[in-house]
Amino acid sequence: MKRTETIPASPVILITGAGKGIGKAIAQEFCIRNSTKLTQSGQEFRPKLFLNSRTKSDLDAVHKLCGDAGVPCEIAVADLSTTAAVNAVFDACLKTFGTIDCLVNSAGVGRWGDFSSLTESDFDYVMATNLKGLFFLTQKIYAVMEKKKAGHVFFVTSVAAEKPFEQSAIYCMSKFAQKGFLEVLRLYGRKNGIRITNVMPGAVETPIWGPVNEETRARMMQPEDVAVAILDAYLQPTRTSVEEIVLRPVSGDLQD
Ligand code: NAP
């Protein structure tokens, strides 16, 4: 069977962590690309968004932005650190839109500090979202894609998925592990026409950093810089997989 070489004209996109920061910017970038021409024959790109995060007011605001842009959107408030919540989000997306064509794993948390000061509670908190939730949500959605022999999974990991940072022992562990997992998943994806993209940003100005001083802020990238790169990768012909995206502030990592 000849594979189609364009993405579905009206794909269902599930974005985790879509209430703030990079995930929110990705949702907004899908809205910006809404109605753009997908093929030379003039077929339009009409994405449908299913958005998750833990804070309802954030998701309500993004939902409104999507509505204003004419993009069908549903939200699911859930903490993906438990498999019960993962299953509920997966079921709700299928119930709403009937399928999933693209998963963007952007939900993520960190606890930072000197290696000797990090606690069991820090460890469990980070791993439950960055590893457990991400693994089981991806597992469920990959099964849907495998049946269709099509799909795309983005992982917003970090430059900390391959570079150590002294104050980030647990965060780096989780991000190195995400990279390990997604590279295994890519072995499966290659056999099934499913694209797996590892997005590795350096410092981006989002709430994950807490308050930052003006000098630091001025060095950071903006969430939309990451979102544009993700949409460009998604809109490639399906014969082409952008396997890795590395984005850094032009002056390098903050800790350099
Ligand atoms: P952010 O501004 O803090 O946003 C994270 C989003 O994820 C929020 O909407 C948050 O929801 C949601 N979230 C966190 N834990 C969740 C959970 N258990 N279940 C559901 N939603 C959850 O962070 P960001 O900077 O956009 O980060 C997004 C991803 O990029 C993360 O994986 C992060 O590690 C990665 N990253 C960030 C940077 C950077 O410099 N900002 C650089 C490299 C990689 P609530 O706010 O409602 O809790």
Image: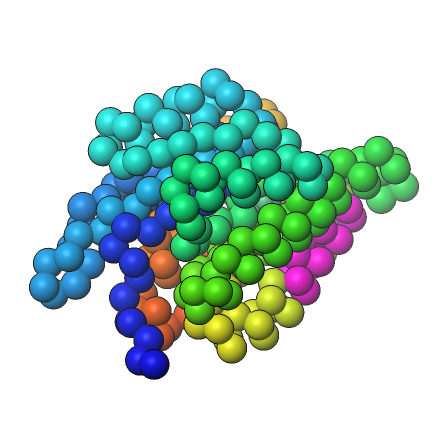
Q: Which is more toward the observer, 245 or 50?
A: 50
The answer to whether residue 11 is left or right of residue 188 is left
| Residue 237 point in image, percent of width and height | 30, 69
Q: Is residue 101 visible?
A: yes
Q: Which is more toward the observer, 173 or 189?
A: 189
The answer to whether residue 74 is left or right of residue 156 is left
Residue farthest top in this picture: 57
| Residue 149 point in image, percent of width and height | 44, 69
Write down the region rendered in magenta.
169-181
Q: Quadrant of ligand 1?
A: top right
Asked if 193 appears above or below 80 in the picture, the reply is below
| Residue 232 point in image, percent of width and height | 33, 58
- Give me the residue at 29% from left, 71% from top: 4
Asked if 211 appears above or below 120 in the picture, the reply is above
Q: Which is more toward the observer, 64 or 25?
A: 64
Q: Is residue 81 visible?
A: no
